[in-house]
Amino acid sequence: MAQSFPEDVLEHVFSFLNHDRDRNAVSLVCKSWYDIERLSRRRIFIGNCYAVSPEIVIRRFPDVRAVELKGKPHFADFNLVPEGWGGYVYPWVVSMAGAYPWLEEIKLKRMVVTDENLELISKSFKNFTVLVLLSCEGFTTDGLAYIAANCRNLRELDLGESEVEDLSGHWLSHFPDNCTSLVSLNISCLGSEVSFSALERLVARCPNLKTLRLNRAVPLEKLPNLLCRAPQLVELGTGAYSAEIQSDIFSNLSEAFLGCKQLKGLSGFWDVVPAYLPAMYSVCSQITSLNLSYATAQNPDLVQFVSQCGNLQRLWVLDYIEDVGLEALAAACKDLQELRVFPSDPYDAEGNVTLTEQGLVAVSEGCPKLQSVLYFCRQMSNAALVAIARNRPNMIRFRLCIIEPRAPDYLTLEPLDAGFGAIVENCKELLRLSMSGLLTDRVFEYIGTHAKKLEMLSIAFAGDSDLGLHHVLSGCESLRKLEIRDCPFGDKALLANATKLETMRSLWMSSCSVSFGACKLLGQKMPRLNVEVINERGPPDSGPEDCPVEKLYVYRTIAGPRVDMPGFVWTMDERVSSRFSRATEGHGD
Amino acid sequence: MTMISEEHKKEKLGFEETELRLGLPGGGGIFNEDLVKNTNANGKRWYTETVDLKLNFALKETEKGENLQKEKSLISCSNDSVKPPPKAQVVGWPPVRSFRKNIMAVQKSSSEEGGGGAATFVKVSTDGAPYLRKVDLNMYKSYQDLYCALGKLFTMGKCDSQGMMDFMNESTLMDLLNGSDFVPTYEDKDGDWMLVGDVPWKMFVGSCKRLRIMKGTEAIGLAPRAMEKCKNRS
């Protein structure tokens, strides 16, 4: 019987459970398992910082060592979420400073972090080792100085692609001379120059340094100095990859790379001068992850370089690779799992590169392990999508962006329903899908019918009516995140599937046809959802009830309506005293 | 609950909400379509049913001339030998992260390729307005475009063509209307605050880090400094 196991035996068994899902399952068995589990949980992942409050988390899990939080909705990446929307880490840091003195790791994504927060972190947690800030904002290099100076055992500092106010590069010099613990350092998003000698000394005294991602200001000529001091590096992000063409720079660089026997990942390559690419040839065959998405190199230099990397598993690249380069990739890199092709000139309607659907088809044919795709292009056909779907039933992430909104199949001028339909029908393990091009309600019918494992769906400029949204909400059993922009989806589908929203993390709808009245009703009926209307032009009730809201963000929560909303966000929660000018409107006319 | 038929909805909404969103976050289209709609016969713009902040600016004669030329060509598209103007940009589309757009912009400008693509986002604050905005300077071709956009950003909008709605309370609004004119200023790469409009447009885009629309009374000290700085540079 479960009850007769001593607690410490159970705790020991639970210590082998690392996945949240397993721990959550275990905590539901009985009250004593719930208690043992909660006291022994050390890692927490909170996908939406407003779904729960710090107090609730701390009350349930009193001894956490690692926290991961996400703030703003994904569409914030594309400037669709106004400044000041929220996602402040402040209340979390303040509460955790008191409750979790042994906290070691903080990982944040799309959150607002201030220098004061960073100072508090650096002074509150004696064993602090890992700080990861992905796509965050609100802090300056002064805040980083606190982290460098006070976190004695810092292992990982990753600034991701955060927006950091760069006051100076001096912060790096705040790492004390006895700091030898660094394993991973990513400062690639910073603009200003750090003291190179400080960086050199830091790298030299950290024997466990595995990941080093430099910023653009570190010149190519100095890279060998760092590589020689860290030959054990596994991941390197170069600084600017340009210099005057000088043979001694080239030979120093080649020699330095020759010494990097453990190197598996390469990134950076700002301002790349193609003549220097061959300096890395000695490591190409080791490389499994290559990020050339900021490298403006073109063919033949580009394809020549990529073709050397026969063991590539992940490639991020600009569309300069073109179809011809992708065909070469398909021939050379049989282990490829992930491909991302970004647009070099996203606003040019015509494009100046020959990258079409052919390139993607070629890779889907030639690379049997391809499972994750992000592809920007200017033309697509149903035939190509069907081919990709048939070639790669193992596809897990498929994100296609055809640059022109509502672009049809360029061969037949038909909608791309059949193509995306083939994707969801063949790729039964599909977890994430982003669609583009001309799409009718039919594609959503296919998605609702087949995409049973789909967890995240992104839709733009698609569909004809509420029926489209209804198919998705009623059919996609595993759906967690749904983000929609500029689609003619309105009240009916939303209200008819209100309970579905409690099974999801969040729903984003902007520039759709959801009326203010429907938002109010949703907020009334579903107290466990936060229904937030974003209207920058003014209060949503200034117009009639059927006036559409600009943006809508709905998410499940046990923390109630949030208290930090800016002036342009309105909660539809009845219990919150209304800021609306008209007090009580009749519920029926 | 009011039962609204599909037809009625369609009429009311006119599907405007589902059209491509042109221009800035939060609405306020300012590009080709609006130029056409809101331009009368002699090329001047008017604002329908909106109250605009009187933005105080000095446009040099040559720039004014340039701008009018550009407007004419955008509207008439009569010159076939010229490449058609780039399409109006939809906010947040294509879905390329601002971080990436800014990096590509920096790399492009330093390699001196033809611009007109990547983004340069700067924050815009207005004295008296409750919150900041971000605008992409590369979306505009001239000061005229920028002022038009700024005016609409911080202007009362309308919903469903039924009267005004005010997002500022009455007293703030009256301050805006009665007080001195608003003056757009910007912080440049050196951290100095300058009057917008003094330098050629492209130079401005390259050096502007942040915009602030100040009350005219506060901006008095700026003009001489701006002129001096230009003199020192040239």
Image (cartoon, coloured by chain):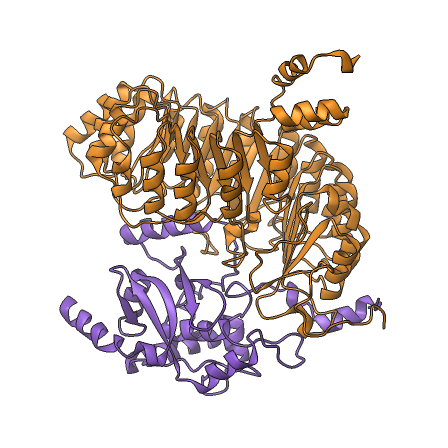
Chain colours: A orange, B purple
Question: Between A474 and A347, which is closer to the camera in this rendering?
Answer: A474
The image shows residue A547 at horizontal and vertical percentages of 70, 69
Question: Between A1 and A368, which is closer to the camera in this rendering?
Answer: A1
Name, please, the residue furthest toward the front.
A98
Question: Between A504 and B48, which is closer to the camera in this rendering?
Answer: A504
Name the residue rendered at 77%, 52% in the picture: A526
The image shows residue A301 at horizontal and vertical percentages of 33, 34
Name the side, left or right, on which A586 lies relative to A379: right
A247, above or below B4, in the image: above
Query: Can you tell which quarter of the image residue A287 is in?
Result: top left
Q: Quadrant of the N terminus of chain A?
A: top right
Query: In this rendering, does residue A388 appear at all?
Result: yes
Name the side, left or right, on which A145 lies relative to A51: left
A175, above or below A565, in the image: above
The mark total stands at: 0
The image shows residue B114 at horizontal and vertical percentages of 33, 57
Name the residue rendered at 74%, 35% in the picture: A452
The image shows residue B7 at horizontal and vertical percentages of 80, 69
Query: Can you tell which quarter of the image residue A204 is in?
Result: top left
Query: In this rendering, does residue A161 appear at all?
Result: no
Query: Can you tell which quarter of the image residue B223 is in?
Result: bottom left
Q: Quadrant of the C terminus of chain A?
A: bottom right
Name the side, left or right, on which A56 lies relative to B202: right
Name the residue rendered at 53%, 65% in the picture: B22
